[in-house]
Amino acid sequence: MKLPDFLRLSPKWAPYVFISPFVLLFVVFSVFPLCFSLYLAFQSWEPTGGLRAMEFVGFSNFAFALKDSWFWMSLKNTLWLAVASGVPQHLVALPLAAFIHTSFKRLRDGVIAVYFLPYITSTVAIAIMFGSLFSKDYGVINATLASLFGMEHVDWLTNSVHIKPAIAFIVFWRYVGFNTVLYLAAMQTIPGELYEAATLDGASRLRQFFHITLPSIKPMIFFGVTLSVIGGLQLFEEPFILTGGKGGPQQAAMTSAVYLFREAFDFNDFGGASAMSWLLFLVVALLTWITNIAFRTRKGATQ
Amino acid sequence: MSSSSHFLRGARTSPTRRAVLAAGVAVAFAPTVRARTSRTLTVAAFPLVDQIVKDAIPQWAQRHPDVGINIVMRQYDDHHTAMTTALSTAVYLPDVMALESSYVGKFSNGGGLSDLLQPRYDIGRHRARYVEYAYNQAINRKGQVVAAPTDIGPGTFLYRADILERAGVTAADMQRSWDAYVDGGIRIKKATGANLIGNVKTLKDIMIRSGLQAGQGIYFDSDSNVLVDTPRFHRAFELALRARRNGLEGRLATWSNEWAEAFRRGVTSTELGGSWMVGQLANWVAPVTAGKWRAAQLPESTWVSYGGTYYAIPRDSDPELKALAWELVEMMTLDTGRQLAALKTQDAFPALLSAQDDATFDQPSEFLGGQHARVLWREAARHITATAVHKQSNFAEDAVNAELDNVLDDGKDIKQALADAAKLLQLRAKR
Amino acid sequence: MSAVASTAPQIGADAPAARAARWTAYAIVGIGALFMLAPFWLMFVFATHSRGEIFNLPPPLWFGDDLAANFKLLTERIPFWRNLGWSVYVALMATVLTLLFCSMAGYAFALMEFRFKKALFGLVMATMLLPSFMNMIPMFMIMDALGWIDQQRALYVPGAASAFGIFLMRQFASTAVPRELIEAARMDGCGEFSIYWRIVLPLMKPALGTLALITFIQSWNNFINPLIVMRSTPNYTLPLALRSLQSTLNTEWGALMCGSAIATIPLIVLFAITSRQLIAGLTAGAVK
């Protein structure tokens, strides 16, 4: 289909035309909220009074956030949960992907599908499900633990010590399959000759795993870990729904994101919540940057 | 021969694919054509209030056949979140907003709700028809009345008559004072093995609500001073600790299945809550225990309210519909028939005094073994006083609960715990 | 598929130790699979039991006979089919729009030069780091200004500018589409849109498939956005509608499980059809 000359897009202008729908939506639906939230961080605002109720208060929201013990506690909770759910995800996903990669030919697609399933389900459905599974006296999990190991029923959801592992487990359950699939996909691009050569040289499978598989999929590991870092630090839906939006016993399950939400909608402090969100953003940016550096230096060393 | 032309010849441009895409983009961005309909009142509510409003539609339709009622129902928390958002931007507000009593307090000072004392509504002339504290609860710091009460939850003391009898304890014994209540619990435990209460926080919650001075809130006073480090809290914490130490508490999360099961099995012998708790027990929590419970006034003549529902009209809602909105609110709250209908179908205790005088109130409650409990609660409602709700009340509640857990689970010293809570609240009090 | 299989190191076929190792691997993967499936299984089982039965000890592990009752209760409380329909519609629209806009923009970022390219891309990536719910109130304001409140377009249009989408598209385009091909097409006199439509897009099929799947899933499961923007129950999408069944007091567990189970089925079906695409897309796109 050839357009007449005057309508044809010249290569000079083409980029701008191609990015314009995206950029338009991006400005309206991403940039504006960003700016508004930054503006809001410097205001004191009782939201039910409407927009006219805003009052400029300088940095006092930030000062408040930094002095607020709940802000720091929520950050601690978030980091704990991010590590406790994130590390096992990848530690399990890597060998699991390797197992599947080497042992399954015909069933591979089926196995992948099964492992990916938790990722695609709605958090609302999952949280409801696990809410019933973690029930102290009537939940399947305690029933299984009791029959397999003779353990007493654990109070998962109303005990401040146990609720964290429970949530970490749910997040782990949800994403381990996703990461497995990612790594599996990456492993499929490793040329078979590398392995053949190594086997000929007498290297054990374990050595092959550590010296061929892992280094080859480093970019994918970086990708997966970055997603986990960002996602873990923003963890919101699982703790929110599982604790009914409250943050759990003694706020043990209150991640930074849940705290922000509560600060805005339960405690009606949008200014404070905005300030906290920007502080949280700095933390996330910092940690992402660190992850970046960590992977880049190691990549440079092995290449 | 460049490889690109090879591609071009091979690529099939499917006209249908393009058409679908074009259609999709067009649909996404085309302006909608909205038909002009007759007027509709939008009512935002949560379960089960939405059902109560739905039941009123036939009566409304008789009065205003050309004005429809559209009910937007959301789950309780989501509803209040959505109302917060709508009020914050003052757009697409419902014409009538159902609010739970604690949220009325939160929203009342923001200025987002219409002052119903204004001449066009003039709720002031109806003041005497409502339960006094319910009406007062809707008065904000500026003296405006921001909502109309529709149902209330007078606090009540529910107990298993059979278990108490076996332990040789009478309700009157336990009503003498809160210490006597806990003492009774000890005797019940010894004699029958049943727990006094499912969750000791319920006990703490009632006790910190008693003994308030006029205009004082639970956690803050009108000058935003923190009230957490006061004898009222100390006593509540001490009694809670005593109950825990004597094993009188089930340590169950309220409304959880374990909590409900404890009722079914007779493991929990008393409960402190709103009158609507009876309906919950009867309907799904523990219907098997029907007939074994009795209601009484709370120990130590404590008069407390547990929740309640209000209807408010947002200040910035559609001005053309405001008169109709108010008419609907009047119908829901001042029409005896509607109040009694809500009582019958949803167990909503009327805030309208004339409804309380109806013969229905003398009906015995089957679940309570034929007791005329409504009379009891009617009496209780007359003694309750309104409590001011501070902006930080939600946070205060969580902070105090967290410290209570520290005391109960980790053995923290009560004085230290309350001092810490006070410090935390001081940081926030003036925000 | 055969090319893929040959890259896998073969576990030594004959030695008994190796065979034991293989069977251990099977067992581990099998147990893991059971782990993944168990909650789903239970969800479907619970969907067929009444509330009282769900919370029995021991809990039911096989199907009951309350499915019809649960479903009836479900459809009584919420306009279930309508909500389901809206979920489908919104997810489809979101997918179409996101694919279109992100592929166009991703192609431009990968293979064209223009001013502020790096800065813009950096800005887009940075927005991924912000907690999403801080958008709630400004989003509401914008929707009102546009007149989109209580309209489904408010749900699928904003997401079309997806940072993840453009990231994936850009990655894939930069590896899968050779620049020379495009240059050659230009020299042949091919128009820019034709290049995009007939050369670039077909080459990006795997990534498009991946993005389509992910977009569909995210749109289907989203409930915060509908909460803010939708005003009337008949216009709700499914998660929002289901959540309104979940009240603190008297949750209708049976109906809730039934609704949740039904809500999951389309995703499972979709995934079953497209899982191969997904792997291919993830492989090619993210290895860089």
Image: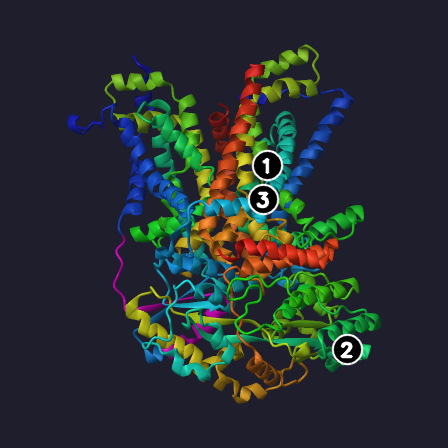
Residue ID for mark 3: A72
Seen from the viewer's position, the closer of residues B218 and B267 is B218
Residue ID for mark 1: A177
The chain under label 1 reads A
**Element type where label 2 sits in the image:** helix
Residue at x 59% of width, y 72% of height: B212
Looking at the image, is A298 positioned above or below residue B417?
Answer: above
Judged by depth in the image, the label closer to the viewer, 2 or 3, is 3
Q: What mark, if any, has residue B164 been given in the picture?
A: 2
Q: Is residue C208 visible?
A: no
Seen from the viewer's position, the closer of residues C41 and A70 is A70
Residue A198 in percent (x, y) is at 65, 13
Residue C218 in percent (x, y) is at 47, 43
Q: Are marks 1 and 2 in contact (CB under 8 Å)?
A: no
**Element type where label 1 sits in the image:** helix
Residue B156 in percent (x, y) is at 63, 76
Looking at the image, is A187 positioned above or below residue B29?
Answer: above
Q: Residues within 10 Å of mark 2 (few under 14, many from 20)?
A: many
User: Which contiguous range is marked in magenta?
Assistant: B32-60
Q: Are marks 2 and 3 in contact (CB under 8 Å)?
A: no
Mark 3 to mark 1 CA distance (whole Å): 31 Å
Q: Residues within 10 Å of mark 3 (few under 14, many from 20)?
A: some
The chain under label 2 reads B
Residue at the farthest top position? A201
